[in-house]
Structures are given as C-alpha cells and as structure tokens.
Amino acid sequence: MSFLCAPQIMGLVRGEPKPGAKHRANGGKILREAGEERHSKTNHLDRTLSHLNEYEGYESGDECWADMDARAGAYRQKVKGKTKAGEEVIREKGLRKDAVIGWAVIIHPADEATRDWTWEEFNRFDEDSMAVLAEICPELFRGANERMSATHKDEAGKHRHHFGDCIAEDGSYCGNRIDAKLLIKINEQFPRMMRERGWPVADMDVTDWERAKKDSAYAEERRTKRESQRLDTNAHVRRETEKAAQAKLDEAEAVLEEARSIGAEAEDERRQARARMAEEYGRIQAEAMMEAQVLRQEAYDKAMRDVADSYIAYEERSRDFQKKEDAFEAQKAVQEAEVAEAKRQFTEAARRYEQAEPTVENIPMRDAIPVIVAGIAEYFTAAANDALSTLGKTLQAWMGKKNYKGSPLMDVLVEKLTSGKKRPRPSIVDLPQAQRSLDDEMGLG
C-alpha cells in the first residue's frame, strides 16, 4: 500500500522573516519549539509525554541556534569592489541580517502508513529520506551540515525534525538555494528515489509553474484542483480532528471506567481495612482488659501482703510491749518490796526514836517521828511530791519551836522538801545512809 510523504522544508533566518518571504521562518523560535524547551502553543502537544522525546546533537534548541548564529556571524565572504579612484579591490563582507543561515526539515510520512510501524522501521525510513535529500541538494542537506534532530513522542504520528547549517562544501553560505524551484524538484524526485530504496511512496501532484505561466487553461485547472485539495485537506483535517477527539473521549471514558474500578477496589479495601481495624481494636481491648485485671489482682495481692506484714509487725510490737509491761510490773514489785523494807526500817527507826530523850519543848520526839516516817513512806507512793511537801511543812513547824537548837542537815532537808520542785525517787540503797544521818542528828548513833 503506497502512501504520501512530502518533506517539509523551511529556511531559517535571524528574527522574523520579511513580509511576503516564502519558505522562511524565525530560526530561534523554531528551535525552541523543537528542543527540550518545547515553547509550543499547539493543542496537539501532550506534555505528560515530553520526557520521552529523543534528541541528537543538541537537546536545547536555544543552544543549537546560538551556535548556528555564531557561525553565521563569523562568516566573511570576499567580494570585488572599487575604490573612489576606480581601482579594483577585494573586501570581506558578512551575511545580510535577513540571510538564510539554516534549514529545518520534517520527515512525517502519512499516519495511516506508520501506525503499525515500529520505531526501527521509522528510523530506517528517516535515514533513507535524509539520504535522498542529500542526493537532490548536497550543498544544503549533506550530513556534515546537520546539527540537531528531535523525535517528538508527545505529538501524534511518527515524525522527526532535522536542523542544519546552509554551508556548501567550499565553506560559503547557500541558504538562498531554498526556494520554490528546489521544493518542486524535491516533490518530483523524492517519491521516485524513495521507491528505488524499497519504500512505496506515491507520486505527488505537482504544478508545473512554468507551463502555468503560458497556459491559462492549465493554470485554471491547477487552481481548481488546489482549491479542491484544500477543501479535501480541510475535510481530512476535520475528520482527523474529530477522530482524534473521539479517541481522546474514548481514552477519557476508559480512564474514567478504570478510575471507577479502582474506586470500587479502594472502597472494598477500605471496608476490609475497617474490619481489620475493628478486629485488631477488639483484640487490643481484650488484651488491655486482661492486663488491667492482672494488674488489679497484683495490686490486691500486694495490699493483702502489706496488711499481713502490718498485722505481723503489730503482733510483734504487742509482744514487745507486753514484755516491757511485764518487766515494768516486775520492777514495780521489786520497788514495792523496797518500799516495804524502807517502811520497816523507818518503823524501827521510829521505835528507836521513841526511846530517846525529847529535845524539843512540849513536842515529844515520839510524836514527831511517826509523822516523819509516814511522810518518808508516802514519798515512795504515787503522790510522792505532795507527801514530801507535807513532810517539809511538818518539819518546818517542828523546827520553829523555841527549844530547837538547829541542825544544818535538817535545814537543808526542810528547804528542799518545801521548794515545790519534783524530786527524784531515792534508791533503797541510800536509806541506810539517810538513817545513819538521822540517827546522828537525833543523837542515837
């Protein structure tokens, strides 16, 4: 099955081309559209696929054009001239500002033919296409002139952009070769030369412009055909646009359906996740309750052990207290025995005092001694202080009698007994010494 393929060729100039200039384009803008910058306003560009684009030579269109512009700016050609005196001279002259310094070629066979091609097949077709162009016009399209190529996979259809300098083999710039005559020549020869290389490229309907200048009927026929082709092309473009839109719509519906399917799967996963979470929550809650029960039981057991330890300590303290109480009772019994012994000794002393001569007028010793003995005995009872005070007062009254001759020991005894200060309990071992002192006082020793 044959197909059409007409290489699209454009001469590149610095800045915008002059009005009316055909087959010319702003080189910097074209390179920026083709390079990784992708400064394109077309609606047919899918930027989500731009990362798949492939480049050779340069990736940046800006860099490629800057180098091409720098080479053209440095170019000088020798031209003959004359001085004011009429002498011939040779001067160097740069390119004009509107000179064509580069070319752009797009190899884009019909999409119907390349839809089932692999990229390896397209690469072979592209190589053969550039080789045929180099045969048709080697000054422009020879391999040494090519600077950059870009394969755009973010646009529909397999195609490739080529860019190069317009430098002939002799080093001169030949951009003016890109004109209508060259394009007609390419459109006439390219299909045939590609068929010779094994590609079924169909001939293109080319207008013979020289004949059209002379044959008005032929010119009208070609004009009508071009108009018909234009209408057919518009219809074709419209059909292709509708087809592309329908494809986009189908793709969007497929994406929507896939999204719905993914949403349903996600909802199922959410339900399963919620079920797993509920199950996990129940397990964790049960484990927490069991752990809390264990902790409560451990706390209760510890509290009971503490209570038992406290009770045991209380029992031990009770036993210690009982021992101390028993020891106190024993000591009390001993002290009571000592008090009884003291009473006996004082009673004996009183008896001995009764046998002595009274020394105080009108107060016999036998009357005073029982009071003294009773007071001393009461000293060893619970009301010891009151007893001693009473004893002191009695002795003081007795000593106040006029016949009392005075005694330092008795004076000190009375002073201490009547002072009101609490006195320590005397040990039973001190009683014999007290008795001897009293005997000495009373003259009974």
Image: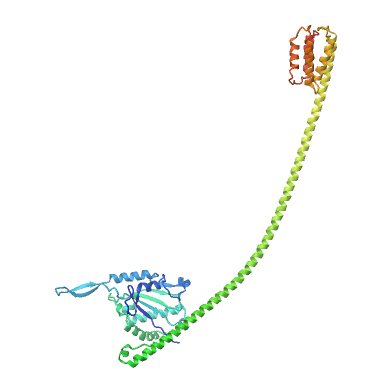
Residue 326, position in %: x, y? 81, 30
Residue 193, quarter of the rendered image: bottom left
Rendered image coloring scheme: rainbow
Q: Position of residue 251 (x, y in %)?
A: 53, 77
Can residue 315 be spotted in the picture?
Answer: yes
**In terms of image quadrants, where is residue 13?**
bottom left
Q: Considering only vertical position in the picture, is 67 above or below 289?
A: below
Please say if 196 is above or below 263: below
Left or right: 176 with respect to 279? Answer: left
List the single residue furthest toward the bottom: 217
Left/right placement of residue 384 relative to residue 103 reads right
Up-down relation of residue 137 to residue 354 (above or below): below
Query: In the figure, is residue 134 to the left or right of 325?
Result: left
Q: Considering depth in this image, is 239 or 425 the residue closer to the camera?
A: 239
Q: Position of residue 372 (x, y in %)?
A: 81, 14
The quarter of the rendered structure image containing the C terminus is top right
| Residue sitting at x 26%, y 72% | 94
Q: Is residue 116 visible?
A: no
Numbered circles on residues, count? 0
- Which residue is nearer to you in this view: 382 or 127? 382
Residue at 75%, 40% (x, y): give it. Answer: 310
Q: Quadrant of the N terminus?
A: bottom left
- Place residue 347 in its image quadrant: top right
391 vs 59, nearest the viewer: 391
Name the spot of residue 385 as percent of width and height, x first: 77, 21
Image check: 380 left or right of 112? right
